[in-house]
Image (cartoon, helix red, strand yellow):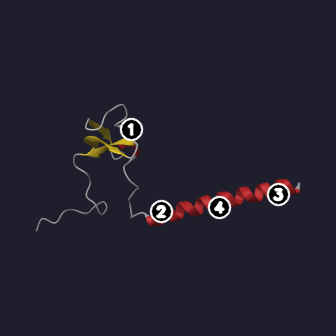
């Protein structure tokens, strides 16, 4: 094998390894079960709509999410009528 092919292989392996390390680090920074911002469906639901329009989408869990499209940066995103509670799944509001 030529030296240039060996170096190309070494570089490819290093790149592949660094991508895995970055993914692990990104997961460590997220809260358990959390995600970074709205799901992709929240953006898709507001395509071809204007800010203030009503929209809905079906979540990965099969729940219908309804809400209003609002501007977020340069895109529209659905702001749910009944957003999930902050702090992660499984936490319920204390009514006592």
Q: Residue at x 39, y 64 (%)?
A: 32
Q: Identify the mark nearer the N-term, 1 or 4.
A: 4
Locate residue 45 relative to residue 6 in the image: left or right: left
Q: Are marks 1 and 4 in contact (CB under 8 Å)?
A: no
Is 24 placed above or below 60 here? below
Task: Determine which quarter of the picture holds residue 89.
Answer: bottom left
Decide which of tag 2 and tag 3 comes sooner along the chain: 3
Horizontal and vertical percent for residue 95? 12, 65
The reply to whether discs 4 and 2 touch (Cβ–Cβ < 8 Å) is: no
Q: Between marks 3 and 1, how big is the CA–CA gap?
A: 44 Å
SS for callout 4: helix
Q: Secondary structure at mark 2?
A: helix
First reached walking from the N terminus: tag 1 or tag 2: 2
- Mark 1 vs mark 4, CA separation in Å: 33 Å
Kindly state the secondary structure of the residue where label 1 is placed: helix
Residue at the spot of label 3: 6
* Mark 1 and mark 2: Cα distance apart in space: 24 Å
Which mark is on residue 27? Answer: 2
Q: Eyeballing the image, is 41 above or below 49?
A: below
Percent x, y of residue 68: 26, 41
Q: On the rendered structure, is 31 left or right of 8?
A: left
Number of the label disc, if any, that sits on residue 17: 4
42, 32: nearer the viewer:
42
Label 3 environment density (alpha carbons within 10 Å; few <14, some 14–19, many ≥20):
few
Calculate the distance from the C-alpha at mark 4 to the C-alpha at mark 3. 17 Å
Q: Which residue is mark 1?
A: 44
CA distance separating discs 4 and 2 = 16 Å
How many numbered markers are drawn? 4
**In the drawing, does residue 1 fall left or right of residue 73?**
right
């Amino acid at each position: 094998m030529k030296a240039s092919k060996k170096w190309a292989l070494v570089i490819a392996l290093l790149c592949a390894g660094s991508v895995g390390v970055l993914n692990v680090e990104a997961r460590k920074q997220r809260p358990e079960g959390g995600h970074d911002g709205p799901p992709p469906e929240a953006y898709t639901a507001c395509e071809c709509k204007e800010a203030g329009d009503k929209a809905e989408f079906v979540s990965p869990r099969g729940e219908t999410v309804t809400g209003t499209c609002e501007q977020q940066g340069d895109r529209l995103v659905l702001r749910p009528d009944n957003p999930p509670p902050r702090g992660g799944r499984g936490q319920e509001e204390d009514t006592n």
